[in-house]
Each structure stands twice: as structure tokens, then as C-alpha cells.
Amino acid sequence: MNDPIVDEIRRVRDAHAARFNYDLDAIFQDIKEREKKSGLKFVQGVARQPAPNQALQPTGAAISVSQDSKSLEAAPAAEL
């Protein structure tokens, strides 16, 4: 499946990289120079660390066991 927008972005990106003989350091320096001239921030130097997914954190035991009883009982539902 061809997407004309994706195709155009790839053409522009390839043309930009070709100007620097696909040298990543030179491409990065060009981006940083353009960033400085524009006053905008194009590339951040440090990746952000993702926050832990709170929904997947352990919530505790689903059942409780009484020391007096040998059978398992369902724990009371958590109050919302």
C-alpha cells in the first residue's frame, strides 16, 4: 500500500541524508544548526524514561486464608 505523504517524507529524508553522504554525525549537526537558527527545539539529547504502568502493578492477594480454617475464602471486594 502506497501512502503519498509517507512517500514524500521518505523522499525528503533521503535527499537530506544524501546531501551529507548518509553520515549520521553530519546530518545531526545540520539539524542542530537549523534548530539554533529557528529558535525551536527539534531534537532532544536525552530520552525520557517511561513511567511504570500503574494498571499492571501488583494489587495484593485475591483470596485470604484464615489460620483457623483449612478452606479458602474470597477476600472482601475493595471499596471504590
Image (tube, rainbow, N blue to C red):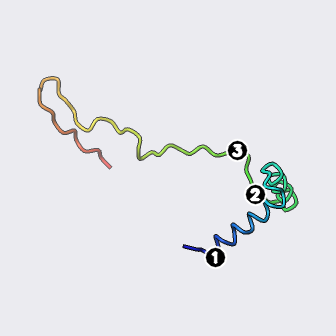
Residue 25 is situated, as x and y percent measured from the top left of the image, at 81, 48
Which residue type carries mark 2? Answer: Phe
Q: Is residue 64 left or right of residue 20?
A: left
Look at the numbered discs 3 and 2 and tell me whether their residues touch, using CB distance below 8 Å: no
Q: Residue at x 84, y 61 (%)?
A: 19
Amino acid type at circle 1 is Pro
Regarding mark 2 in the picture, which secondary structure is present there?
loop
- The image quadrant where one finds the N terminus is bottom right
Q: Circle 3 — which element?
A: loop
**Residue 46: which disc?**
3
Mark 2–mark 1 Cα distance, whole angstroms, equals 24 Å
Q: Which mark's residue is nearer the viewer, 1 or 3?
A: 1
Q: Amino acid at mark 3?
A: Val
Instruction: Find disc 2 in the rendering and name its residue.
Output: 42
Along the polypeptide, which appears first: circle 2 or circle 1? 1
Left/right placement of residue 61 relative to residue 12 reads left
For this orientation, the residue located farthest to the bottom is: 4
Residue 4 versus residue 65: which sits nearer the camera? Answer: 4
Report how far apart the C-alphas of labels 3 and 2 lie in the structure.
13 Å
Looking at the rendering, which quadrant does residue 4 occupy? bottom right
Viewer-closest of 73 and 47: 47
Q: Which of the marked residues, 1 or 3, is nearer the chain's N terminus?
A: 1
Q: Residue 40: where, in percent of width, then height?
A: 79, 60
Label 2 Cα crowd, 10 Å radius (few <14 / some 14-19 / many 20+): few
Q: Callout 1: few (<14), some (14-19), or many (20+) C-alpha neighbours within 10 Å?
A: few
Q: Which residue in the structure is indicated by mark 1? A: 4
User: Which residue occupies the foreground of this view, 64 or 46?
Assistant: 46
Looking at the image, residue 11 sits to the left or right of residue 1; the answer is: right
